[in-house]
Image: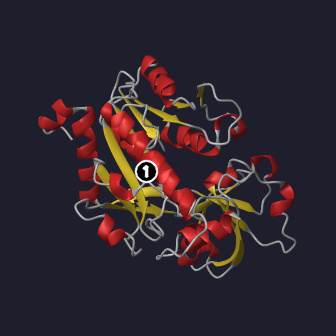
Amino acid sequence: MQQRLTEAWYRERARPSLLTPLAWLYGALMRARRRAYVSGWVRTERAGKPVVVVGNLTVGGTGKTPLTIWLARQLLEQGLKVGIVSRGYGRRGTAPRAVQSTCDWRQVGDEPLIIARRSACPTIVARDRVAGARALVAGGADVVLADDGLQHLRLGRDCEIVVIDGARGFGNGRVLPAGPLREPLGRLPQPDAVVMNGAPEHASLGAALRGSPALEMRLVAQQAVRLDAQGPPRALHGFSGQRVHGVAGIGNPARFFRELRAHGIEVIEHAFADHHRFAPAELAFADGLPVLMTEKDAVKCLAFAEPRLWYVPVAAQFGAREAHELLARVLAKVRPTSVAGGQI
């Protein structure tokens, strides 16, 4: 069902759908909700320190997590103490919880665990993002990054970054459940920065991005890591010419498979739903071929790691100009005095 819906959502032109009336209702509710916050009928709450929100307008992966990690590292280099708050989708419990590198993904969620490990920043998962952000500030954070918090309007923010997948764009341009949009496109001109993951290829991007030029980002994968941690990483081109099983339980599995093929790898595709909880039998392929999966999948498969299983970390990468501009925009909101003095 999810795969069929995704295929329908990301067509470049919308087709008649029985879900259209529900989409009209959903869109109206989202507009009314945003107006309630803008007008002050519903109160926005502050964390006590600047908050930077990294989010997207569509369902599915756009590259928010790698961008959050990149931005956290950049701010650390600027001498800021960075804390990261995330909902922790699919985890057990709702109360705020600190994420340690040794945590069980079931308790904190798969993406927050990767963020905590890769950023080395204090990370908290909380359904109530305001409570999570305040806990980070109480712990000494100078700035809070909210991963996937664009629609969490109760959390006051000083800077918004919208991430868009260049290949899939806004799909058919409709809101849920008739399309992939979490909210109507009318809110796009408001962010402080629009980041495009990959070149803008999708037809839906042309009109929507007028007046909101995007900074292009790439997700780069260079090596594979054994899931059982035995032996050194292996360059992806070392698999060139081989057949492998590609496993991806992420928002956009096709992107992962394309990345593997770009390194000359022959991929047998196994796409799963986003945040899929893997069982050993799902990776027990009888042919003995290597299995390459995403890092997000790997945190859920450690319990049954074996020599055939590898994961492929990705990192956000910008050109020098785009990196400088994005960091400058963020620092202008979280540390305006230092930016005015040219200290970037």
Q: In terms of image quadrants, where is residue 178?
A: bottom right
Residue 36, image x and y in percent? 38, 35
**Foreground residue among 226 and 29:** 29
Residue at screen point 30% across, 51% down: 193
The reply, left or right, for residue 192 in relation to residue 72 is left
**Foreground residue among 344 and 125:** 125
Residue 243, image x and y in percent? 71, 79
On screen, 275 above or below 45?
Answer: below
Residue at screen point 67% across, 67% down: 3
Residue 266, image x and y in percent? 66, 80
The reply, left or right, for residue 292 in relation to residue 318 is right
Q: Is residue 140 visible?
A: yes
Dot 1 lies on which element?
A: helix
Residue 204, image x and y in percent? 39, 71
Residue at screen point 38% across, 58% down: 185
Please say which color scheme the image uses: secondary structure
Tell me the quarter of the image containing the C terminus.
Answer: top left
| Badge 1 density bin: few <14, some 14–19, many ≥20, Cα 10 Å | many
On screen, 265 above or below 324?
Answer: below
Q: Amino acid at mark 1?
A: Leu
Residue placed under numbered mark 1 in the picture: 67
On screen, 157 above or below 96?
Answer: below
Q: Residue furthest top?
A: 138
Q: Residue furthest bottom?
A: 241
Q: Is residue 72 visible?
A: no
The reply, left or right, for residue 22 in relation to residue 336 is right
